[in-house]
Image (tube, grey):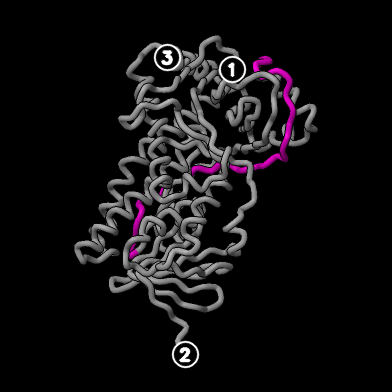
Amino acid sequence: MSNTSSFDVIVIGAGPAGLSLARSLADTSLKIAIVDPAPADVLKNPPADGREIALTHQSKELLESMGAWDAVPEGEIFKLRSAKVVDGTSPFELHFATPETARGKPTDTLGYLISNHHIRQSIYSQVEHQPNITWFTEQKVQSVYGKSEDAGVTLANGQKLTARLVVAADSRFSTTRQQMGIPVDMHDFGRTVITFRIEHTASNDNTAFECFHYGRTLAILPLTEHLSSAVITIDTQLAHTVEDLDDAAQAQDIAQRVNGQLGDVKVVSQQYRYPLVGTHARRFYSTRFALVGDAAVGMHPVTAHGFNLGLNSTMILSDLIKSAVRQNRDIGAPTLLQQYDRKHQLKTRPIYHGTNFVVKLFTNETPPAKLLRTAIIRASNMLSPVKKLISHQLTG
């Protein structure tokens, strides 16, 4: 008996990007295989990981279109009304208020915050029983190939899957991207993110607060009025100075760094730690092979674009695939994948390099850098077109 199974699309990785792509192809005749090393019960009920994801209005629309928005547990979608950026002890701040409209519609929010595990859970709930999906859970991809006539993978258990198109959504450290010979620009920031939830007696006014203190960055992401997520970014060699604090000392440090604006602070969750590495593939395709989500672009979280760009990648690719199906064309054709690459690169490259520039500038402690940061914040706050451009990027 042959141990080879044939599909139209193989998706490697059952994270939000991979599942979103599969969900967007639900109404097609395509046979889809999804491969992921996690057990099905973990995909169905992923554990909390401390990450709060900022979503644009466009991302909300995409999640709504796949039914995932309404599947988020009640009370777990938090509105972000405004955002402030502060540079150390500078008296100037960059403030972004709720725009009157977003994507041509009246709005009462700059964006939304949802915990990562709730997003994963909600999207999985929409594809769990999708008829055209075959699941290969608790399976790792051992090897992948792409040829002019077909593509495929070999699983760790020896099973072979073939398809017309293989899509990698297996993280910014994608091993399948490497096997397919796709070069990647990688930047290790040498910094670590430490995040945890806090309660506070004063209102956060539904306002995100980001302060580039010298030596570290502190972001306060508003959830409910008196509940926020604290996100500290610090040189990795100094991460222990944060992690070694007990909850009481941690809370006192946060309260002092925001100049008492949050009132009394209390730490109410465990700490989560993540290394900061940015990646951008130099191209998003190879022979019958495409990259989506973090496998294509892994962003620094400071501008909150990573998840939104990941969703955007699945939208672009799925639209091209569905168009090819309607016209009875090859869904893995080089022309289709080149078109996907052009469209997604056009959006990601400026944001990726612009974000890296901002991070380098705002973590540089030399006097010229400090002067330039102050000048940028003052100018951006005074020039309405600049603020509108940045707000447009924030809202999507």
Comparing labels 1 and 3, the label whose residue is closer to the camera: 3
User: Residue 104, relative to residue 97: is it above or below?
Assistant: below
Tell which circle, 1 or 3, labels the residue nearer the N-terminal end.
1
Seen at 52% across and 69% down, the residue is 136
Instruction: Please state which of residues 98 and 338 is positioned toward the viewer in this rendering.
Output: 98
> Residue visible at 49% across and 22% down?
82
Instruction: Find the distance from the CA under tag 1 to the CA under tag 3.
Output: 16 Å
Q: Tell me if residue 266 is in the magenta stretch.
A: yes
In the image, 173 versus 42, the foreground residue is: 42
Q: Nearer the viewer, mark 1 or mark 2?
A: 2
Report the Cα–Cα distance between label 2 and label 3. Answer: 68 Å
| Residue 324 horizontal/vertical position (percent) | 24, 61
What is the quadrant of the C terminus in the image? top left
In this picture, which residue range is highlighted in magenta? 259-288
- Amino acid marked by disc 3: Asn
Residue 288, x across and y down, in percent: 33, 65
Q: Which of marks 1 and 2 is nearer the N terminus?
A: 2
Find the residue positioned furthest to the left.
Answer: 327
Q: Crowding near pointer 3: few (<14 within 10 Å), some, many (20+)?
A: some
Write the residue at 53% across / 43% down.
277
Mark 2 or 3, closer to the camera: 2
Most extreme residue toward the top is: 91
Circles 2 and 3: CB distance less than 8 Å? Answer: no
Question: Which residue is depicted at the point 49% across and 14% down?
Answer: 374
Q: Mark 1 points at which residue?
A: 88
The percent coordinates of residue 53 (x first, y second) are 53, 39
Circle 2 is placed at which residue position?
A: 1
Q: State whether residue 30 is above or below residue 44.
A: below
Q: Is mark 1 on a helix, strand or loop?
A: loop
